[in-house]
Amino acid sequence: MISNDICPIGNTLDLFNRKWIFCIMSNIFRGMTHFNEFKDANPTISNHVLAQTLKYMEEQELITKTVVDEHHNKTEYALTPKGLRANRILYEITEYYFDELNYSNSDDVEIEELLGECRKIYNIW
């Protein structure tokens, strides 16, 4: 039995406690690796919040940051093995959205196609 002091769900949610983490992780799964790509994909996030979130994700070992061109201040971000393991969480959130959060689309085939694409993106087989 799990001790009352240990709550796996609460402790995991503490790790992912910032609004943009899952969006950024999803962006990386979709092939985005640069700050400006994350900003373009999430236009309502401020540069400051994005920078702070990426720093937090690095500190939590969810992503790595690699400087690819110091002269032009270009960096790339990648998921670590720990970050990659969140693939099922991201997929389940996506599936929950389509199943439960009033996604209004009368074409069930389209939803299945979208979920199929998501299974590929998140490497869910």
Image (spheres, rainbow, N blue to C red):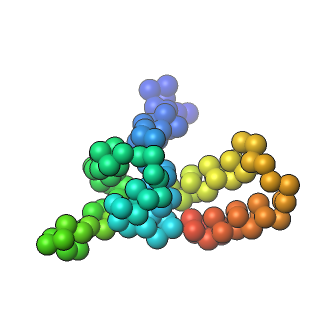
Q: Quadrant of the N terminus?
A: top right
Residue sitting at x 57%, y 65%: 122
Residue 78 in sight: no
Q: Quadrant of residue 121?
A: bottom right
* Image position of 64 (left or right of 19): left
Residue 45 x/y as whole percent: 41, 46
Residue sitting at x 31%, y 68%: 76
Residue sitting at x 66%, y 69%: 117
Q: Quadrant of residue 109?
A: bottom right
Tell which of 26 and 46 is nearer to you.
46
* Image position of 83 (left or right of 52): right
Say how many tags the image has.
0
Q: Quadrant of the C terminus?
A: bottom right
Residue 117 in sight: yes
Residue 57 x/y as whole percent: 34, 51
Residue furthest left in the image: 71
Does residue 40 lie above or below 11 as drawn? below
Residue 116 x/y as whole percent: 70, 68
Residue furthest top in the image: 4
Q: Quadrant of residue 106?
A: bottom right
* Image position of 94 (left or right of 72): right
Tell which of 79 and 48 is nearer to you.
48
Residue sitting at x 63%, y 64%: 118
Residue 51 x/y as whole percent: 29, 50
